[in-house]
Image (tube, rainbow, N blue to C red):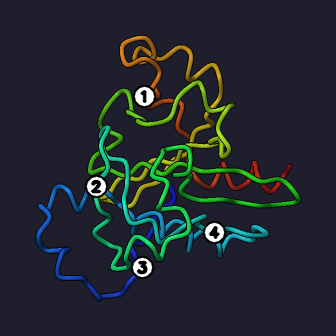
Amino acid sequence: MTIIAHLSPNGERKDSSYYLESFEARLACGNSWEYSLTEYLNTQGLDKVYQPDQYMTHRAVYGSYRPDPDNWRSRNQSKLAQDLYPKYQRDIRVIHKGAGYNLEVKSKSGIFENHNILVGGIATRWERYRFPVHFVVAIDRNTGKTRVTEADRLTRETSWLRVKYKELSYAVPRHLFRPLDTWLDFLKSQ
């Protein structure tokens, strides 16, 4: 089982506005988990792993946008932050053997205790987006345990959230998530 070490992208540097947000709002963003996963994947022999815009100043959290607490840069310093649509929020880009994959990272305390893992803000209409999602990565914030599932059509279209929320969110059954090591082996064998 792969355990990701939790790193902070800005070290101990915190803007004063960081302390104005509630603790729950800071956890909801989870930006440093994306950074931690990027750093881990960079050590695994893949050709290139990076965050398309690690300076994104806002994050989609349950249907609304919140300032990213781990980000002390102003909004105009970000390449993509001027357009806050979810289609630009592909968290991590992996390139290996000429193929590119977009990863959406979901982190939550005790995320694997639920039978269905909610993936919000992305939908069956991904094909129209400039940056489609290929894999969804779930990270348990308590333990750092990390698992991956393919964002395939079957998973999306069989979701109980598909009709209820007009395809803006969907829930992935927990048993479809596989260990990160297995996913890395799959990528390297392609």
Query: Which residue is drawn at the image coordinates 40% and 77% (left, top)?
Result: 7
Of the pair 159 and 188, the residue shown nearer to us: 159
Disc 3: which residue: 9
Pointer 2 or 1: first along the chain: 2
N-terminal of the two: label 1 or label 4? 4
The part of the image, by quadrant, that contains residue 15 is bottom left
Distance between mark 2 and mark 1 Cα atoms: 18 Å
Residue at label 4?
A: 50
Q: Which amino acid does label 2 sit on?
A: Arg
Q: What crowding class fits label 2: few (fewer than 14 Cα within 10 Å), some (14-19), or many (20 or more)?
A: some
- Marks 3 and 2 sit apart, C-alpha to C-alpha, by 18 Å
Q: Name the residue under label 2.
A: 66
Q: Distance between the residues labelled 3 and 4?
A: 13 Å
Mark 2 or mark 1, which is nearer to you? 2
Residue type at the position of mark 4: Tyr
Residue 126, x across and y down, in percent: 62, 32
Residue 31 vs 115, above or below: the answer is: below
Q: Which mark is residue 169?
A: 1
Type of amino acid at the residue the image marks with label 1: Ser
- What element does badge 2 sit on? strand
Q: Nearer the viewer, residue 170 or 15?
A: 15
Dot 4: what SS? strand
